[in-house]
Amino acid sequence: MLEKNKIINQSVRKTGVATGEKSGFYSVLLFICWPLLSLAAALKNYRKPWSKNIFWAFCVFYGLTFAIGAESLGKDITGYISSYQEMYGHSMSINQVISYFAQSGEIDILSLLISYVLSRFTDSAAILTMVYGAIFGFFLSRNIWFLLNRMKGKLLPISLLLLTCFFLINPIWNLNGFRMWTAAHVFIYGLLLFMIEGKWKGAGIAALSILVHYAFIVPVCLLIAYVVLGNRLTIYFVFFAVTFFISEINLEILNEAIDAYAPQIVQERTAGYRSEAYVESYRAEEEDTNKNWYVELYGKAFKWVVVGFLSVLFFRGRDFFDKNKEWLRLYSFILLFYGVANLMSSIPSGGRYIAVVNLGALSLIIYFIQNYKFDVYMKRFLWAALPALLLFIIVSFRFGLYSMSPTSMFGNPLIALFISGDYISLNDVLKMLI
């Protein structure tokens, strides 16, 4: 009887493996025919081992068909492409590249390395953005599935909504700013490995984000500070709360501190962002009265929703943190990071740290909402937060239309091979139709 059961179990396992291999093959075939539909299938079957790689493949395809239109002017992506195409056709040795890098005043080497390697073979903007999509998409897919793999039971509607927000905090169309936003996902990927799984290699990966964008020297230094200080939940929360009442930091004091203690390369790299003229122009742009109300509101509303969640967790989630020390570590770091991000948000481009810390905060919030029985206070807050979450989702997807091409949505890799030139955005298509 035991032998018979053993044979049956082995047969079931073999059948499951065969079925999994077959479904994986069909998912690849579907991707070749219509990537968007394969993406939908991957999300529906998110527990399948092939799902995250189909999502990743779609990000690569999105990069290949990335639309660079008038809305991209002034974005980082135009500078990346221009610099990369200038390298094409010029013979450059490794020593010359190193010399170029040393003279450029850059800290982050990844973008330059990609441009140099690709420019030895081609000057195609589509190939460059495809490689960007491959790197960005790898870390984006791994961060999303890090959460999905820890979801117990059937996903709650609110969990699906929050997962959508997690994607939209730093979506695939942020290839427009490849360095900063890829570094964000690299940092979060390493942070989650370090905090939740206790792997020190995660801290190393998080530190490598500096090589993607120099601005990540701030969160990396904060991670080091957290390792030294440990969990100081009440202190971090008080710091987190107090920073909301500090409207802006003293620019003169900040400049003096950076000039006194920061390495020379950091001083040079940040000088433009710290100049009074640049700060004034940035504030004038922020106060532009011609912006639509939803552009002004959607980010702020979402930030306050996240802040509200973190505050409710501090007062109502102690039992959860007592049982889940790994998530307590992440929560402590998020409070510390959020406090610093609040202070930095008054400096031009400093507000980008809010998006980075929101990724970490939402990781914790999604896990808690899906896996832990929350009380009536959290339920009431969820209902109150619903309009802000929906506004964030709608407006964020609207911005995606500026770099989303019709080929990205309705084409496939075979069609993309025969399309040359720049891709038109869905936003431009809608303008022509309306």
Image (spheres, rainbow, N blue to C red):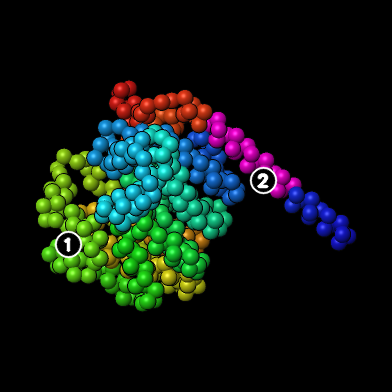
Which residue matches tag 1?
Answer: 247
Instruction: Evaluate whether residue 237 shows in this view.
Output: yes
Dot placed on the residue nearer the N-terminal end, 1 or 2: 2
The secondary element bearing badge 2 is classed as helix
Image quadrant for the N terminus? bottom right
Determine crowd level at label 1: few under 14, some 14-19, many 20+ residues with C-alpha closer than 10 A: few
User: Which residue occupies 49% across, 53% down?
Assistant: 142
Which residue matches tag 2?
Answer: 20
Residue 217 drawn at (x, y percent): 32, 62
Q: Disc 2 marks which amino acid? A: Gly
Residue 137 drawn at (x, y percent): 45, 46
22 vs 224, nearest the viewer: 224
Relative to 41, is 384 on the left or the right? Answer: left
Determine crowd level at label 2: few under 14, some 14-19, many 20+ residues with C-alpha closer than 10 A: some
Query: Relative to 143, does residue 114 appear above or below in the rendering?
Result: above
Which stretch did the figure color magenta? Answer: 15-34
Q: Disc 1 marks which amino acid? A: Ser
Count of numbered circles on the image: 2
User: Which residue occupies 32% across, 65% down?
Assistant: 337
CB-based contact (under 8 Å), mark 1 and mark 2: no
User: Which residue occupies 19% across, 54% down?
Assistant: 273
Q: Is residue 21 magenta?
A: yes
Q: Is residue 121 magenta?
A: no
